[in-house]
Image: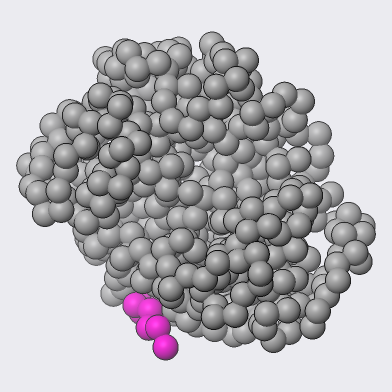
Amino acid sequence: MFFPAVGRYGVASRIHIASEIGMEILEEGGNAFDAAIAVSAALSLVIPHTGGLGGDAFVLARLDNGELVAYNGSGRSPSDFPVDEFISLKPKRGGLTISVPGLVDTWVWVNSEFGSMELKDLLKPAISMAENGFYIPYQTSRASKILYGELSGFESWRKVYGSIKPGEYRRFKRFGQVFRHIARKGYDGFYSGKIAETIVEELNKEGSPLSVDDFERHRGDVMEPLKISYGEYDVYELPPNTQGLTTLQILRMMEKTGISKLERDLNWWRTYMEISAFAYMDRDKFIGDPDYMDVNPYTLLSDEYLGGYVSSLSLSGGDTTFFTLSDKYGNIVGFIQSLFHPFGSGLVAMEIPFQNRLIGFRFEKGFPNSPGPGKRPLHTLSIALLSREKEHYIVGCAGGDLRPQIHSQVISNIVDLGMDIGSAVMAKRNMLLKWEDGKPVEAVFEDENYPEYAKPLKYPARAVGVVQALKYIEDGYTEVYADFRGGGVALAK
């Protein structure tokens, strides 16, 4: 059995120092939204390859009064985005892959709508670490070592992150300067004025077409979560441009085929892989910036739409950091931030790595997710929330394209198999990696038995994603759990 941390409130994140900072805010009387900003800032500095000020963020939360809130903090492509050049070059890193980062806007929105503490006080721990120094964790140094050959050609990355070592004591003075501007001026401390001008100038030198005007125009959006019923639970996910819809499609097809109630043998996993392949095919065809989509997400979740595919099945019997927290007031929050690939584009400005989120676009025209100026690409980030009467869960992960499978498997472990959150997170996971024409082609399995197109992984494997999860019982207690696969820490009190 895998034991979660239990208490009145708690935090689960990818690294101990962030969880500790979150708990300190909660113990001082701050709420879960206050703690989320402090945790996010600490993660941005200490494990910068996973997400940060140069990347995007999403929030899905349940308030003490039962209301759900969701925010899309993803940024858009530059107004002068060279679409034809982008399609021709198909870049994976570099200046053409950078969109306007939305994390700081997300902090400001969260703080203004739900915060009980001043933003400047929530950023104090991160400012102190940036200016006074901290010990480089293994996660960051390992990412730097593995990616050196790929990223060392970007001078800005090589100078800041190319030589870091585990246990090295480092200060990031320019990073701290950016934190201080945000603490004083909020939104304007990052998206306009001196900081924005300096960031844009440094990114332009290495090929990004972003402008200060692009920064100044950025605003995130309040969203309405998508909802389905699964078993006895209501399941909520973030709508497009995220792939939350894909998670819900997988769950709906698991229920319609009946496999949600079957033993998880090899035949079960064959069917699950086919279901996932279909859902990903739909994702790539239909999902993108909602301003450019011509199909209602609920159409893709309907019995009429999914029934035809399900009847054709032959049934046989990405880097990110997510954290979740609760407070003593009854709020629960899921918060996810990312650069997409580790260290994102490879470009660094003011010691901040910037994302390569624009590679989420298709490299062809004529689709909702085709590239264009001032447009959001398909986002792999999403968060799941489950509710049944007074019992509520939040599930999130680092997993990139695999996220819909990770979420659906953990949710099914909770709903169909009755697992506690520790066991649900640590159960063996198996992931579809490639598909063609809606059929599985390549997969990885933590299970000992696997189909002919799959490769085995030694359990527990980082390759099947890293999950953080929370369970909250109204007027009762919180359980938080951090996946062993990622070295995270869950704390509760």
The residue lying toward the viewer, choosing from 212 and 136, is 136
Q: Is residue 428 above or below residue 62?
A: below
Q: Is residue 229 visible?
A: no
Q: Is residue 60 left or right of residue 299?
A: left
Task: Kindly give the residue lying farthest to the front in the view shown.
Answer: 452
| Image position, residue 283 (x, y; %) | 71, 46
Q: Left or right: where does residue 89 sit relative to residue 122?
A: right
Locate residue 481 relative to residue 290 in the image: left or right. Answer: left
Q: Position of residue 167 (x, y in %)?
A: 11, 54
> Based on the displayed image, in which of its 4 quarters is residue 413 positioned?
bottom right
Q: Quadrant of residue 187?
A: top left
Q: Is residue 191 magenta?
A: no
Residue 338 in picture, x, y percent from top left: 43, 44
- The residue depicted at 69 percent of the width and 86 percent of the height is 263
Residue at 26 percent across and 44 percent down: it is 144
Give the dominant element type of the magenta stretch: helix, strand or loop.
Answer: loop
102 or 482: nearer the eye? 482
Residue at 71% of width from left, 78% of height from top?
268
Q: Quadrant of the N terminus?
A: bottom left
Span colored in magenta: 1-10
Residue placed at 61% from the left, 38% from the top? 378
Q: Quadrant of the C terminus?
A: bottom left
Would residue 7 be counted in the magenta stretch? yes
Front residue of 202/13: it is 202
Please determine whether, in this image, residue 196 is positioned above or below residue 243: above
Compared with residue 104, is residue 126 higher up or lower down, i.e. above or below? below
